Image: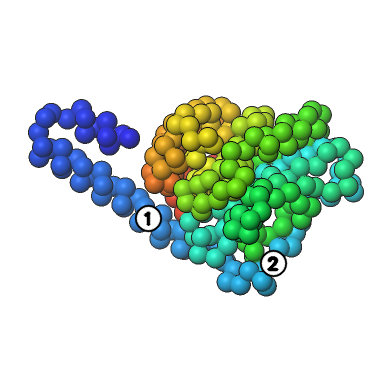
Amino acid sequence: MLCLALLLALPNDMFLRMRWFQICGLFFLGVFGLGVVLGILVGNSLASDWRTASRASIGIAPDPATTPEAVIQVYAARAFSWRGRFGVHCWVAVKHSAAEAFEVLEVIGWRVRGGMPSVAISERPPDGRWFGNPPEVLAEVRGNGVDAMIDRIKAAIETYSYPDTYRVWPGPNSNTFVAHLARAVPELRLDLPPTAIGKDYIPGGLPFGRAPSGTGFQISFLGLLGVMLAAEEGIEINILGLTFGVDPLDLAVKLPMVGRLSVSGN
């Protein structure tokens, strides 16, 4: 977008416009290439066989037996196999007050291929490994008022536009679903990572909508090209599903494949 603005502002000289086009193209290729290298260097251990890959808890979710209050958590883990080099799978875990177990809400691609609804609701471990890859907590709320937030999340499941559709790229997929749920509860202030490919695919095919955090707005054309400006996410540019961005409040840079690189260490 910035490059396009610069090109339009240039004098009507084809040579100058071509030079700027080449510079912008080389810049984005360089950044993407850096992302590929860093993604390979810092990439998680990716399971090779889904039948033997661990789905076990890593012990970071609260125990319902000793946590009577209502809880909402959002998790992300590197996707299975080669897809994990590029992106993550996100899901939401909820527990009503005094409930004996968490419910995990997520979209799973193989369900659609098997003729089932894309949305899965289960009592699997909320902090379970995603086919060998450990999850991290992206957002959490608990206590007073959270029961009502859970009810709003469950109501948002019914309004999800793609119960029978799943596409790894550019969406709709599991990250599109989690972004949709997050918009229903802006109190989460969810900042989905740049590796959550599909988060910018606005449900309903609309080109304009709220940012998933509820703290700003975004323009997105089918998850392939867009811009986001929000207090929580900062400034993000989406090019072919790849997110580049800056979060001024947290002093962080966002890159495809790599994720967030924070100066503050958060």
Give the residue type at disc 1.
Leu
**Looking at the figure, which quarter contains the N terminus?**
top left
Q: Which residue is mark 2?
A: 54
Residue at image location 53% in from the left, 28% down from the top: 210
Callout in the foreground (2, 1): 2
Residue at image location 26% in from the left, 47% down from the top: 25
**In the rendered structure, which disc, 2 or 1, sits on the residue that comes first in sequence?**
1
In the drawing, what numbered circle is on residue 34? Answer: 1
Mark 1 Cα-neighbour bin, 10 Å: few <14, some 14–19, many ≥20: some
| Residue 93, x across and y down, in percent | 73, 45
* Foreground of the two, 177 or 143: 177
Give above or below for 55 relative to 250: below
**Looking at the figure, which quarter contains the C terminus?**
top right
Let me know if residue 213 appears in the view.
Answer: yes
Quadrant housing residue 44: bottom right
* Foreground of the two, 221 or 114: 114
| Residue 197, x across and y down, in percent | 50, 48
Residue at image location 88% in from the left, 47% down from the top: 100
| Residue 260, x across and y down, in percent | 51, 46
Q: How is the image coloured?
A: rainbow
Give the residue type at disc 2.
Ser
Residue at image location 35% in from the left, 50% down from the top: 31
Q: Residue furthest front?
A: 115
Left or right: residue 55 versus residue 219 is right
Mark 2 Cα-neighbour bin, 10 Å: few <14, some 14–19, many ≥20: some
Left or right: residue 81 versus residue 14 is right
Kind of element beneath mark 1:
helix
Q: CA distance from mark 2 to mark 1?
A: 30 Å
